[in-house]
Image (cartoon, grey):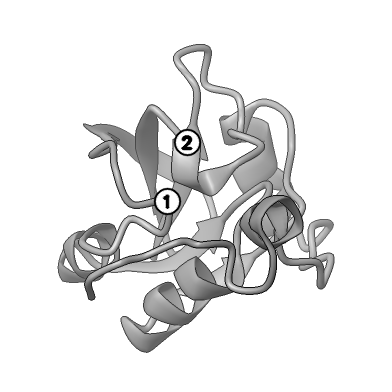
Amino acid sequence: MKIAVPVTTTNQVDGHFGHCEFYSIYNISGEGKITEIQTIPSVQGCGCKSNIAGVLAADGVTVMLAGGIGGGAINVLNNAGIDVIRGCEGDAAEVVKNYMAGTITDNGESCHHHAAQQGEGGGHQCNH
């Protein structure tokens, strides 16, 4: 199993998926232990990272543990076969361990940052 986490330079879960600096990819063993951590840089630009879902899915990622994330990004990730768990915060490795222990669940809240600032639709354009 592989789990992706959008992170800051200090390996904290980024509070806004569209602004993260890196993605940490955690390889999880059959026993639920972290066996390897890979870091890939985040391409800056479109907040929903229109190309990152395909990159992560091709690498075998099936779960995204995120802080704040919008509905568009969730749809793109889900369509690539990646489940999104929202509302995560803190040290990324600890979040992954807690998820594997079953103590982290989706908070059910999507980021409405763009819509709240710029009206319905948020004036946000992505070319998927």
Dot 1 or dot 2: first in sequence order is 2
Residue 124, image x, y percentages: 45, 61
Q: Residues within 10 Å of mark 1 (few under 14, many from 20)?
A: many
Of residue 47 and residue 12, the one placed in the foreground of this image is 47
Q: Position of residue 8 (x, y in %)?
A: 50, 22
Q: Give the residue type that dot 1 points to.
A: Gly
Report the residue at 60% width, 24% height from top. Answer: 12
Q: What numbered label is drawn on residue 115?
A: none
Q: In this view, does 34 lie above or below 1?
A: above
On the image, the x and y values in percent for residue 88 come to: 73, 47
- Report the side of 23 relative to 17 (left or right): left
Q: How many labels does the image show?
A: 2
Question: Label 2 belongs to which residue?
Answer: 19
Q: What residue would you read off at disc 1?
A: 47
Q: Work out which residue is located at the far top of the displayed protein and give it.
A: 10
Q: Residue at x 39, y 65 (%)?
A: 1
